[in-house]
């Protein structure tokens, strides 16, 4: 795994997963966490490809997917920007949380835990950690 900083983006590249998916996941996560702000300018495809030492088509594929998600938008002659819609980011954050919960539940069930066991474990962990974290 290698790490790269491009502007406000930090990438951890793991060659066991397709590169465009890693860019996509890391940018989505950065937007959802607020590490990249609403309306922020994204690095150009060429700049990001050069910095990460990868084919521009790989970066372009990730950028196209981000645009289809509604998380970024192209501005003619200006480049690619993070959406300025807080509602879209909140919707995506909710979708992402749902995916994380589904994956967690699937893993817990694969360990043979019942719904009651899972609930008790989560409740105990929440109580131990002092409630919700912000």
Image (tube, rainbow, N blue to C red):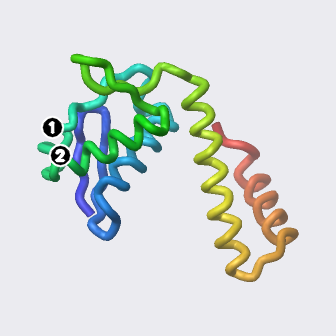
* Residue 86 horizontal/vertical position (percent): 56, 23
Tell me the CA gap for discs 1 and 2.
6 Å
Q: How many marks?
A: 2
* Residue 57 horizontal/vertical position (percent): 21, 48
For the N terminus, give its image quadrant.
Answer: bottom left
Front-most of 45 and 6?
45
Residue in view at x 37 percent, y 55 percent: 21
Helix, strand or loop at label 2? It is helix
Front-most of 55 and 115?
55
Q: Which residue is mark 1?
A: 46
Where, by quadrant of the figure, is residue 105 drawn? bottom right
Residue in view at x 46 percent, y 44 percent: 29
Q: Are marks 1 and 2 in contact (CB under 8 Å)?
A: yes
Q: Is residue 130 above or below residue 134?
A: below
Residue in view at x 62 percent, y 54 percent: 99
- Point out which mark residue 56 bears: 2
Reading the chain from its start, which is encountered first: label 1 or label 2? 1
Mark 2 Cα-neighbour bin, 10 Å: few <14, some 14–19, many ≥20: some
* Residue 53 horizontal/vertical position (percent): 13, 51
Image check: 120 left or right of 48? Answer: right
For the C terminus, give its image quadrant.
Answer: top right
């Amino acid at each position: 795994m290698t790490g790269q900083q491009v502007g406000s983006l930090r990438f951890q590249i793991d060659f066991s997963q397709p590169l465009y998916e890693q860019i996509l996941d890391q940018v989505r996560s950065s937007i959802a966490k607020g590490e990249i702000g609403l309306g922020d300018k994204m690095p150009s495809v060429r700049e990001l490809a050069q910095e990460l030492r990868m084919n521009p088509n790989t970066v372009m594929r990730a950028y196209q997917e981000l645009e289809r998600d509604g998380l970024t938008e192209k501005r003619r002659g200006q480049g690619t920007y993070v959406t300025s819609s807080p509602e879209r980011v909140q919707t995506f954050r909710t979708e992402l949380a749902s995916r994380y919960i589904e994956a967690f539940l699937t893993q817990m069930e694969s360990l043979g835990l019942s719904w009651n066991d899972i609930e008790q474990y989560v409740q105990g962990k929440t109580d131990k950690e002092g409630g919700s974290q912000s």
